[in-house]
Image: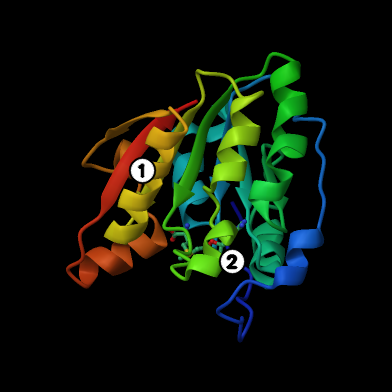
Amino acid sequence: MKLTKPKLPKRVRNHVNPLADLIEHSFDGFSNNNPIIIDIGSYRGEFVEQLLEKFSSSKNYIAAEIRKPYARFLEELFTEHDNVMVFDGDTAKNFKTILKPSQDKGVLIEYVFINFPDPWFKERHKKRRVINRNFLQETKKWISTETVFVFQTDQEELFRETQELLVEERIIYEEFSEPLWGAQTHWETMKIGEGDNIYRMKFFM
Ligand SMILES: C[S@@+](CC[C@H](N)C(=O)[O-])C[C@H]1O[C@@H](n2cnc3c(N)ncnc32)[C@H](O)[C@@H]1O
């Protein structure tokens, strides 16, 4: 990891840029066959930094972030790590093209983290949620049943609605209470500090 952190952008718009949806990525995979962990909505990369400390180079990591200034920040932050790839754009839309080639080569997509995603409460915005019906239906067609999806949020309404969607799509989930490996995300630390509850589940397709 770099000793001095790159400077954060001075101001980043709070809402995701819909134009970023158009960014398309594909990825042939890492130069080794280690399992892959993907963090969707990496923000400033604190979560991936903790995983790097925990697992070092025994895993490969994908840090995905829709907001370009943060994606640039992440590229700089992880520049010295061959086992970290950064992608900008809407990860839900690029999910298959950045992960399936690795799975086809026999690499395990071990974990998919969706940590504290933007809730998009308005009915007409719900399709912007990372976990939406289309994402589940498309992903189910090709992802390994061994891949563990981890969803964590402080938004109970989003959590319950996501569970309903999973049931409708016949996807099994289980709730759990403590963060895996004790790794707290930036948002989680902030929300716990504000006294909020955290809701967590794992699901498998
Ligand atoms: C509420 S923040 C949580 C950040 C971090 N995961 C954490 O827990 O501290 C949500 C992050 O997800 C990013 N994001 C939202 N939609 C996304 C998408 N479709 N693809 C990738 N990143 C997304 C946002 O730009 C933002 O950085």
Instruction: Report the residue marked by disc 1.
Output: 164
Q: Position of residue 198 (x, y in %)?
A: 25, 55
Classify residue 119 as left or right of residue 57: left
Name the foreground residue: 30 vs 156: 156
Please tell me which of labels 1 and 2 falls first in the chain. Answer: 2
- Please state which amino acid type lies under the numbered disc 1: Glu
- Residue at the image point whose x is 58% and y is 58% from the top: 127
In the image, residue 121 above or below residue 85? below
State whether residue 69 appears in this view: yes
- Please state which amino acid type lies under the numbered disc 2: Thr
Inter-mark Cα distance, 1 to 2: 44 Å
Instruction: Report the residue marked by disc 2.
Output: 4
Please rate how many residues cluster around mark 2, counting C-alpha atoms within 10 Å: few if below 14, some from 14 to 19, many from 20: few
In the image, residue 69 above or below residue 136? below
Question: Which element is circle 1 on?
Answer: helix
State whether residue 31 appears in this view: no
Question: Which element is circle 2 on?
Answer: loop
- Residue at the image point whose x is 31% and y is 68% from the top: 190
Classify residue 107 as left or right of residue 205: right
Q: Which of the 4 image quarters holds residue 7?
A: bottom right
Q: Which of the 4 image quarters holds residue 68?
A: bottom right
Q: Position of residue 135 (x, y in %)?
A: 60, 42
- Residue at the image point whose x is 59% and y is 27% from the top: 140
Q: Position of residue 146 (x, y in %)?
A: 50, 18
Report the residue that reaches farthest toward the left.
195
